[in-house]
Image (tube, rainbow, N blue to C red):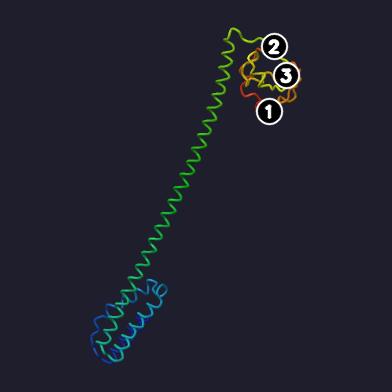
Amino acid sequence: MILRAATFILLIFLLVSGCAAPLPTWRSRVAPLVEDVGRQDAPRLFPQEYRSLLETFEHGEAIFLVTKDHKLADSYYQMAFQKAELLQSELQRVRKRKEDEERQRVAEIAVKAEEEQLMREAAQAELLLREQEKIQAETDARAKVESEMQRSRKEPNQPTTTKYTVRRGETLPQISGRAEIYNNAELWPIIYRANRDQIRDPKRLWPGQVLTIPRHFSRNDVENPEEIRRHQVR
């Protein structure tokens, strides 16, 4: 704005005076540069440097218009040009720093997003592994029970005890694990089902209780029984 006003005054002055004196050499070079740094936010980022540039340029304008000392005016235009170049360099440095900071910020966001994605994938993989381990454990447990049942059916001297008297401190898994009963503690629900009329809580047995020991049962009687889930006798 200042530059345009000064140019307009200069043209009027030349027309009135009728002089056709040539413009100083540095004026045509510094004028667009001053406008350029003004558009690049120099007044806000470097207020003192920008003010010094304007003062130097305006001083040269005043000498050129009033005293018509082109040589002296050109020396101020040259100083203004040097200040404008320096200020332009500082503006480029600030712009480059901001661009670098923005690239770094974007890169950090990308790295963080990738880390979060890897953590989610790791959590999903761990959850899947646990599910697979759980399924495998259930499969192995069923296979073990079935194997024990098949082996007991094949053994020629299979126990034939059909009654058992509870001793002090005994539990259903202990009784089921005895060799003359099932030789497998995990089959305790079979005894519990057959004696529910006298066993209210499978975790509590009383000495002297006479329990019925079933000898004919199917796989469904021992696979995932409801009593195991409800009472979890150990």
Viewer-nearest of discs 3 and 2: 3
Task: Name the spot of residue 228 as percent of width and height, x first.
Answer: 65, 26
- Identify the residue at image location x=57%, y=18%: 146
Residue behind mark 2: 162
Q: Residues within 10 Å of mark 3 (few under 14, many from 20)?
A: some
- Residue 156's place in the image compared with 2, above or below, is above
Q: Amino acid at mark 2?
A: Thr
Instruction: Identify the element where label 3 is drawn.
Output: loop
Marks 1,2: beta carbons within 8 A: no
Instruction: Identify the element where label 2 is drawn.
Output: loop
Residue behind mark 1: 231
Q: Residues within 10 Å of mark 1 (few under 14, many from 20)?
A: few
Q: Quadrant of residue 26?
A: bottom left
Which of pointers 3 and 1 lies earlier in the amino acid sequence? 3
- Identify the residue at image location x=38%, y=73%: 42
- Residue 19's place in the image compared with 31, above or below, is below
- Identify the residue at image location x=27%, y=79%: 28
Cα gap from disc 3 to disc 1, whole angstroms: 21 Å
Q: Amino acid at mark 3?
A: Arg
Cα gap from disc 1 to disc 2, whole angstroms: 24 Å
Residue behind mark 3: 167
- Image check: 209 left or right of 190? right
Q: Quadrant of residue 227?
A: top right
